[in-house]
Amino acid sequence: MSAQAPGGEFALIARHFRPLAGPGALDLADDAAVLAPPPGRELVIAADAMVAGVHFLPDDPPDLIGRKLLRTNLSDLAAMGAVPLGYLMTVSAPRRTPQAWFAGFAAGLAADQAAFGLRLLGGDTTSTPGPIALSLTVLGTVAPGEAVRRVGARPGDLLFVTGTIGDAALGLRAARGERADPDGFLAGRYRLPEPRLGVARHGVVAAALDVSDGLVQDVGHLCRAAGCAAEIEAARLPLSAPARAALPGALTLILTGGDDYELAMAVPPEHEAALRAAAGAVPVTCIGRFLSGPPRVGVRAADGTELALGAGGWSHFD
């Protein structure tokens, strides 16, 4: 995000993005940021993209688009037990995009920068024939050797999730007008996930990831990384009141829909109390356990039968 010359692009950067910049960004006046990690910390770096019509609806409020972009990346830091430090961002938008859209987008970023304690470090702005495409690279830090990874689950570990599951998948359908959502709760959960920073702690959580592509599919990633199986008890899923009201018809969607950005964690039984202490006000629920056997995820109904789900979640290329 160089801002060294006059013109539409540079005026846009100065107006909307320079106020978001932190000290390492050099006032967005150079081609790169200069950043010193805190002493005795390791960097954790993650990147995610969002495209209109795929990750958000084209008419979603721009402030919520900005906040979702930042929060989905913060969720990756949360899964690894990292503390936010800063971020780089690329914005590709059609030339006809109004200044009001950029103002709202930047206002959403500013609100969540203040809430989560990080600043913009730089990036790029480009025009595109459409649709709007956004990319964000987030930087965080952990103590050396203390990043929580996907690998690490063992047979006998408990499977925990934060928050409630399935709201975002239902919320997408509500936002499209395909499902009733009188108070907007479900659509709000789709548009504005909550990164669960501070829950997945080294020495407490053996392995973790965020649930972005569907609970069953993402738990399967933990199983493949560790070479073990997992079993989910459907009756133990933490559900919001609107999601519970959608049962039984929506159970498969709840289990396989994406965009919740809650954490799925392998936790040794002896660390359950420590997990709940680390989570504080964030709800955590045990929904199953990890088992010996080849990597797979089974889901048991209340009567003990295994549910047939088909695809376990979302993939961009299947």
Image: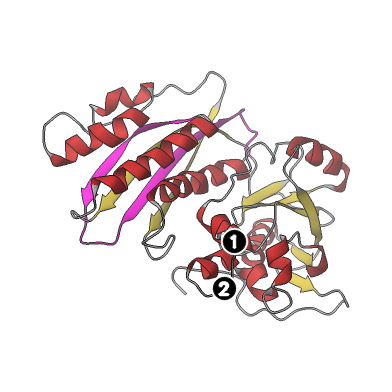
State yes or no: residue 210 in magenta.
no
Q: Is residue 258 left or right of residue 297?
A: left
Residue 150: percent from left, percent from top: 64, 50
In terms of image quadrants, where is residue 254? bottom right
Compared to residue 168, the image places residue 145 above or below, namely above
Callout 1–callout 2 Cβ contact below 8 Å: yes
Q: Is residue 244 left or right of residue 38?
A: right
The answer to which of marks 1 and 2 sits earlier in the sequence is: 2
Residue under label 1 = 186
- Amino acid at dot 2: Arg
Quadrant into which the N terminus falls: top left
Residue under label 2 = 179
Compared to residue 213, the image places residue 63 above or below, namely above
The magenta-colored residue range is: 118-147
For the point 29% across and 36% down, which residue is it?
16
Q: Residues within 10 Å of mark 1 (few under 14, many from 20)?
A: many
Residue 116: percent from left, percent from top: 54, 33
